[in-house]
Amino acid sequence: MRGSAATLRHEFIGLYGMVERNWYLIKRYAWWEIAFFFWTAANTLTIVFIAKGVVAEGGSIDVNRLTTILLIGAVMWSYLGIVFELLIETVAWERWEGTIEYTFMAPLTRATHLLGTGIFAIGYGIVRASIVFAAIAAFFGLHMPHANFLTAVVLIAVASVSFVGIGMMTAVLPLISPEKGTQFGYVAQGLMLVVSGVYYPVSVLPEFMQWLAKISPATYALRGERSAIIDGASVSSVWGDIWPMAIIGVISVPLGIWVFRRGELHAKKHGKLKRSG
Amino acid sequence: MFAVEVDNLRKEFFRRDATRTHGRKRRKRVAALEDVTFTMERGECVAILGQNGSGKSTLVRLLSTLLLPDAGSARIFGHDVVKESRAVQRLVNRVSVEASFFKKMSSEENLAYAARFYGIPPSATKKSIPEILERVGFPISRRHEAMENLSRGMQQKVALARALLTSPVLLLLDEPTTGLDPRSKLEVQEFIRDVWTTHDATILLCTHDLREAEVLADRVGILDRGKLIALDPTEALKEQFGAETLEDAFFAATGRTFEDEKDEDAERGVFA
């Protein structure tokens, strides 16, 4: 009993260490973060302006509604980008700095290692995405009179678990392939959003993509967030979007840790934990 | 119980050949370590001498659970490095030729997060980090500076501090003084000697500095092309090979000098 309490304490301190390390990095690379923030904001603007562009070209639409739909899509894309990037960079950045061997030889379970990164990614991603959302909404003077932000928060919390689980699976790629792994991770992120209806309803996609949309947590997160912010849906009314994400999360997190562990054993067998770059 | 018990340890790597068969590059097996066997007593300091590509770093990586062996076994204080890797990780730390830190982060930040991975809470490191930095001869007023602004010698001192912060009972030193200026080299060597005599630490020192091996170690091993061909106290080695110096003994044992590297070594150097 005492032994397991000590082990648990050790793992919690390790988890805190992962969060602490990422916080130090964000602080030390503050100018990078500011630059990325403006890049994300500018990128979001280019997408959200499409609604006004449609009207300027003679289209007849509810500009406020389409602008909000596009804004939710763009912010979700940037949020998912942060979560995936931090998890993929778990390996890639450490390999570049040369610290990878020191992290992998520490008495830290891989679950603690990955969950620590995931927790930081969620916290940091939510803060950055919320600032972008608020800034762009203010820029366009968007009206969201029915918005139910409590539902929006519940949805993003549940979605984040499954995003982290899938992110863990992509984090294994730089471990297996030091040269190409990171890039493949970004491909996985892009594909996930394409099939999930990031700026359009899933119904416009070809049938095989619609099938893929069913197993992507981003599909439910995007649909639920739009219902909550545009139509003011309550938690109970978006339950149909919550439970699939919860199931994907329950499966993807342990699966992600298992996949990463397999990748680690492969890297240890073939000597791929060495520094490169 | 031995501090380190290595039995017929073998590690091979695949290397892509430049020649192609059916459009694909051929892969060739290269043995980085071949059936290495030795033991170390608790509190002992053993130096392993070898050229680049001899397998020194592969041995250190296997003992620190960063590689899986292809055959044989290694035990640290009775714990198998493969089956009981977590127990081994708690006992071992390592200093390698490259200091390996997050360059933008300060020495204090690098040490703090690394300590957490070993279960050391912030309340403990608040006091112990300045203490340990001072002990390795690092000016503590510079502990908030980014690592990239520190000299190579300073960075290596922080690497020693990182290893000692976790109180390892087995310290693996993989060419810790390579590339350092003479003064930093002496300081680091002094510190290693100090740790060895004042802590209950067992030290495995991999080096290609003959003098370092002679001065610091109880026994000196010669690792040549993945094979451990000798492991004895310096005087016994000299006697065994009828040599006056350790360098002559190395030459007699391997048939080549330290500077004499062949193509085969360069090829092996990719792995080892």
Image (cartoon, rainbow, N blue to C red):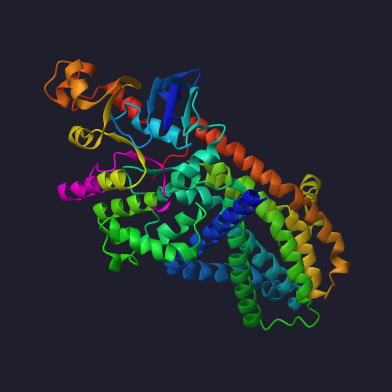
* Residue A236 placement (x, y as % from top left): 88, 68
Q: Nearer the viewer, residue A195 or B9?
A: B9
Count all numbered tags in the image, as a single digit. 0
Q: Is residue A3 magenta?
A: no
* Residue B79 placement (x, y as % from top left): 52, 33
**At 81% from the left edge and 69% from the top edge, which residue is drawn?**
A227
The residue furthest left is B244
* Residue B40 placement (x, y as % from top left): 37, 29
**At 39% from the left edge and 43% from the top edge, which residue is drawn?**
B94
Taking the image as shown, residue A52 lies to the left or right of residue A204, namely: left
Residue range in magenta is: B165-191
Q: Is residue A149 above or below residue B124?
A: below
Q: Is residue A109 above or below residue B131?
A: above
**At 21% from the left edge and 26% from the top edge, which residue is drawn?**
B234
Taking the image as shown, residue A166 lies to the left or right of residue A245, namely: left
Q: Nearer the viewer, residue B161 or A233?
A: B161
The answer to whether one can see residue B255 in this image is no
Q: Nearer the viewer, residue A28 or A142?
A: A28
Q: Is residue B189 magenta?
A: yes
Asked which quadrant contains residue B41, the reply is top left
Q: Nearer the viewer, residue A69 or A123?
A: A123
The answer to whether one can see residue A134 in this image is yes
**At 62% from the left edge and 77% from the top edge, which residue is drawn?**
A136
Quarter placement of the C terminus of chain A:
top left
Q: Is residue A116 above or below residue B188?
A: below
* Residue A243 placement (x, y as % from top left): 83, 57
Taking the image as shown, residue A185 lies to the left or right of residue A207, namely: left
